[in-house]
Image (cartoon, rainbow, N blue to C red):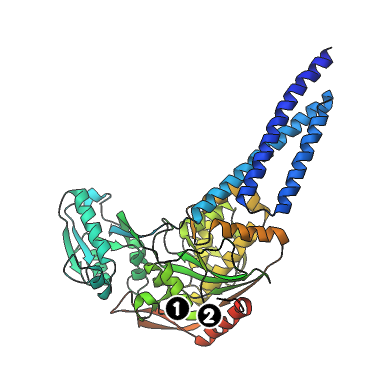
Amino acid sequence: MIKLKNLHANEHVGYVTLIVYIVMAFALIVQAADLNMFPIFYLVIISIVFAALGILFFLMHRKLVTSIIASVLSLIMIFLCGAGAYYIRQTMNALADVTSMGEQTDVISVYVMNEDPAETLEDIKGYKIGVVRASGERGMNKVEMQNAGDADQENLDKTIDHLEETLHTTLDISEVDNMFALMDELRSQQVKAIVLNEAYVGIISDREGYEWVATGIRRITMVEHVVEVDIQPIVPKVVPETFIIYLSGIDTYGGVSARSRSDVNILAIVNTETKNVLLLSTPRDYYVSFNATGGVRDKLTHAGIYGVDASIDALEQLYGIQVDYYLRLNFSGFIDIIDALGGIEVYSDYDFTVTPIRTYQKGMNQLNGLEALAFARERYSFPEGDFQRAKNQMEVIRAVIQKCASSSMLMNYASVMEAVAGSFETSMSQEQIASLVKMQLSDMAQWSVTSYTVDGHSMYAETFSMPGTELYVIEPDYATVETAKGMIQEIYGGREE
């Protein structure tokens, strides 16, 4: 009698767990189908397996011992279905975040010297504040500002107005005609604070004699200004057989929408039919022209200041191609993603030290996010300078891809998705990304990846972004550019425009 009561009790519990399992399994399959990354064949197999397990659990509830086992197995499957649903939701949220092409922003900041006691905006009330003004008059219209070679003037005016409104006072503004004079006045304390687009801080610190700017000034506050993005959305839901995606690593630790220098400039030329990928790296200091300059040449890295569309335009003109998509990643996101993966292993061609980060050995090095970033950004330690840096950047990309393809991705999936959200921005749609994943899951093909970096020679020249002063640039070796064009055509040729 007791055994019979136990059987009935376990049956009731077992059937409840079975029903919960069926609901969870069904919900998981619906979510997986909605994600649209899994081939139909996979979904059918999973559905058959789930159904078979449900029938098996139902039959096992007829006997006491097997009923207990079925209940335990049902609970395990409920947990696995819940985990699967959670991972799918994380994936969908991350995709929604990285593919939502928000407006780009210009960040105008207020800086003081590091040793200045000011900590807040209120603390600089009464300071003489320096700004760069192409013309001594405020209120120039947009066309006049662009003709003056300084499109930041409108946002500068808005920022000053905002600061004055916040402080309820009129600021004591001192105007100079170039950014180096601005930094000179700040360092000599002729002005106690400056207002400047933060994208230009890195440009200034690249000039000989102004290296101190990178670490010698401190931001008090910032004001973001939305800018228009002139990039047409891609209509097809699936990517073409061959396409080109621009990978841009921007020089900022804040939001990925901020317009900033692009320190990493890699074109990935992809052929999904032959499974070939060419990673083409262009040095950040390449001396190029793009439409925003009106034909005046500038560093490739400076193009990012005018928006991702300007960087794309520069590369399209250089190689005579059409870039289909872009992907931007900021430095803070880079660190977070690699840390979430548990670090990466990269090969170094040299022994070198990045103070105070770490010393890298020739050969394989296990790196965390910050160490990987330092490895990808260093150039002064190498005879080849920026060219070796480009090679190291592609080595980091290779290591990240390898780590993502390992079990580490599954073990750290949730943290990786969290790191990706807000750190990436791409013009690919969710449907296009899903179609690529589905294609890969369908054939599980091995990809052949080739890397190439165009060459050039070092020199000093005036740039559009910094008129009146000569900066270090790399004059393109057009023979290597032609070689790159040939390599592109080997993979990309034959596509109908």
The quarter of the picture where residue 113 lies is bottom left
The percent position of residue 219, horizontal first and vertical second, equals 31, 56
The percent position of residue 220, horizontal first and vertical second, equals 29, 53
Amino acid, disc 1: Tyr
- Mark 2 Cα-neighbour bin, 10 Å: few <14, some 14–19, many ≥20: many
Q: Is residue 277 visible?
A: yes
Where disc 2 sits, the SS reads: loop
> Residue 372's mark?
none
Where disc 1 sits, the SS reads: loop
The number of numbered discs placed on residues in the rendered structure image is 2
Q: Which quarter of the image is occupied by the N terminus?
A: top right
The percent position of residue 39, horizontal first and vertical second, equals 69, 55
Residue drawn at (49%, 68%) of the image: 264
Disc 1: which residue:
286
The quarter of the picture where residue 160 lies is bottom left
**Left or right: 160 with respect to 377?**
left
Residue 198 vertical placement versus 177 (above, below): above
Amino acid, disc 2: Val
Disc 2: which residue:
454
